[in-house]
Image (tube, rainbow, N blue to C red):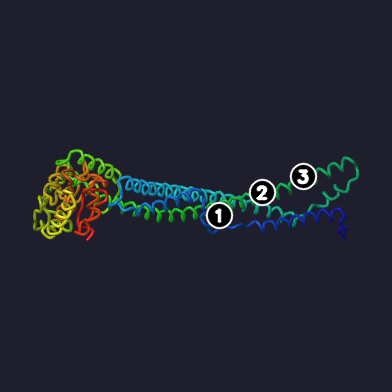
Amino acid sequence: MATTPPRSDKQKRLNQRFFALTAAVLVSISTFGVAVGSSVDAGAVATDARTQRANIRAEQARVAAQVNVLEGSKAQVLAALSTLNENVRGQQAALSEARRQAEASAAEAAQAERDAAQTSRDLDALRARVAKYAVKAYVEPPDEALMRRFEATSAQEDATRNALLNMQSRTDTDVIDQLRSTKARLEEQLSRARQSKAEAETHAAEAEGVLQTLSAAQAQQQAVASQVRQRLDETLSDAAFLSRMDAGLGRQIADEAAALANAVIGIPGSGSGSGSGSGSTTTTTPPGGNSPYPTPALTTVNGITVASSIATRVRGLLNAASADGINLSGYGYRDFNAQIALRRQNCGTSQYAIWEMPPDVCSPPTARPGYSYHERGLAIDFMANGRFINSQSNPGFVWLAANAARFGLYNLPSEPWHWDTRGT
């Protein structure tokens, strides 16, 4: 019975090489499983130049929102509105950019995950191929004929042996290199996906924060715009009346009011809207909740008609001024029907147009009926020595500033001629 001769040392070394290769491949396969779709927590939003600019705008807007619109000068009010508008525009731009970056990062993450999924499938196929090859090499090592070829001693046979070994070595190396490069590519794609996801989450969080800041900025803007419209209701009412008495002063008031009205056009606010004022309902009856004060009992004092409730105080004020050499006269109560007629002319004939449309929406800007203290008989536009008081340096204004409060009348600082009871 023939016996199998013991293998030579070269054959043993060759088999050991194949067995080592098999073990290496199997270990490689076991370490190439990488999960797809992992993510990392988003980091805190970095404070960059854009964030710093937004913070500065927000602080400037906070200060601007504290301007007393009813008392400030036109320049102060316009500056405050400009600051508030710039803050809103800046926050809107920041919100758009944050949302754009969030969408771009999410799209990049999705693409990286698709790439990683394909690479993972490629890796599975490569692992299966290498595993099959490695197992075959383990189960079916080189045969005796190949081993005898390796034992040849001639130069030609030695060259053949080296060529065979080199071919086998290159095959082994190519397989391992493919595994390594595919695994590296997969890890890079997964890392990119994780990073893009984190960036998308960061930008989404930033967008949410900017949205809240934008809402606060718009609330500030709308609150100031509402005060400007309240001022317009008073100022424009005076302009329409005073222009009949003093054309120059009337134009001055109208020009200032037009600048303020232009600054708040398009800003939403209480009572604002986009109605054209061309509705079919024509009425002089105000809607519920917007009713002007009813016509008060009236008394005329030295040519100035006012509510009877303040007639005694007005008489005392006029007498005191006269005693100090200041001849005061002026105009008090005004029927709101004249303002209704102006609203029909400049705003429209619908219920909304007459009573509710913001003054800045009309063309030209026109005060709403029922908002002026003159219509309550509680305000006076003063003249001193026959001319309207149009500056705070006017002697009439100087006297009133020092004495009017004793009689319950207070100045609307944006209008040196206008004094009413709102301080009480």
Q: CA distance from mark 2 to mark 3?
A: 21 Å
Quadrant of image for the C terminus: bottom left
Q: Earlier in the sequence, mark 1 or mark 3?
A: 3
Quadrant of image for the N terminus: bottom right
Kind of element beneath mark 1: helix
In the rendered image, which residue does mark 2 sit on?
181
Q: Nearer the viewer, mark 2 or mark 1?
A: 1
Q: CA distance from mark 1 to mark 3?
A: 41 Å
Q: Position of residue 104 (x, y in %)?
A: 48, 47
Q: Nearer the viewer, residue 327 or 46?
A: 327
Horizontal side of 112 relative to 86 (left or right) equals right
Contact flag, marks 2 and 3 (Cβ < 8 Å): no
Please state which amino acid type lies under the numbered disc 2. Ser
Location of residue 27 with respect to 82 vertically, above or below: below
Q: Nearer the viewer, residue 390 or 267?
A: 390
In the rendered image, which residue does mark 3 sit on?
167
Kind of element beneath mark 3: helix
Please state which amino acid type lies under the numbered disc 3. Met
Q: Nearer the viewer, residue 51 or 398?
A: 398
Residue at horizontal 64 percent and vertical 49 percent from the top: 182
Q: Nearer the viewer, residue 44 or 201?
A: 44
Q: Earlier in the sequence, mark 2 or mark 3?
A: 3
| Residue 174 tag number | none
Please state which amino acid type lies under the numbered disc 1. Arg
In the rendered image, which residue does mark 1 sit on?
194
Q: Nearer the viewer, mark 2 or mark 3?
A: 2
Q: CA distance from mark 2 to mark 1?
A: 20 Å
Classify 10 Å Cα crowding around label 2: few (below 14), some (14-19), many (20 and above).
Answer: few
Kind of element beneath mark 2: helix
